[in-house]
Amino acid sequence: MRCSALPEDLIAAQCAWERTYRSLADTANWQRTTALRHRLLELSVQVWWHPYWQQAGTGQRAALRFSARERESGTR
């Protein structure tokens, strides 16, 4: 079964994941590494086990990442 639209909460979680990942990669945040890793793990679980994936078609995970990056860059 193919879904046409990604849920808003799933896109928001992926956007938060992207921001957290970038923060973790930034050497200025070296004192927050543990907290950022914990947050990244929480967001990974939230995204991976979202109920949407029970009905999503092939390629939707890539579409989610694309939508989140598009939203974060402000091109949407």
Image (cartoon, rainbow, N blue to C red):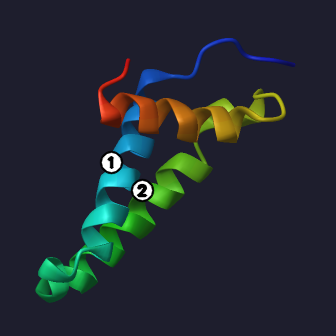
Residue at the spot 40% in from the left edge and 62% down from the top edge? 42
**Residue 15 in picture, x, y percent from top left:** 37, 42
Local packing at callout 2 (Cα closer than 10 Å; few below 14, some 14-19, many 20+) is many
Q: Residue furthest top?
A: 4
For the residues labelled 2 and 1, the Cα–Cα distance comes to 7 Å
Instruction: Report the quarter where the C terminus lies.
Output: top left
Residue 10 appears anywhere in the view? no
Which residue is at 24% across, 83% downward?
33
> Can residue 5 be seen at all in this image of the molecule?
yes
The numbered mark, 2 or 1, whose residue comes first in the sequence reads 1
Tell me the crowding category of disc 1: few under 14, some 14 to 19, or many 20 or more residues within 10 angstroms, Cα based.
some
How far across and how far down the image is residue 6, in percent?
Answer: 57, 22
Q: Is residue 15 above or below residue 31?
A: above
Above-or-below relation of 1 to 35: above
Q: Residue at x 51, y 22 (%)?
A: 7
Q: Nearer the viewer, residue 10 or 27?
A: 27
Q: How many marks?
A: 2
Q: Which residue is mark 1?
A: 16
Question: Looking at the rendering, which quadrant does residue 70 occupy?
Answer: top left
Dot 2 corresponds to which residue? 43
Say whether residue 55 is left or right of residue 32: right
When the figure is inspected, residue 69 is found, relative to residue 3, above or below; the finding is: below
User: Mark 2 near mark 1, Cβ–Cβ under 8 Å?
Assistant: yes
Please provide percent x and percent y for residue 12.
37, 35
Amino acid at the residue labelled 2: Leu
Residue 61: which numbered mark, if any? Answer: none
* Kind of residue at badge 1: Ala
27 is higher (above) or lower (below) than 75: below
Of residues 11 and 19, which is closer to you in this image?
19
- Comparing labels 2 and 1, the label whose residue is closer to the camera: 1
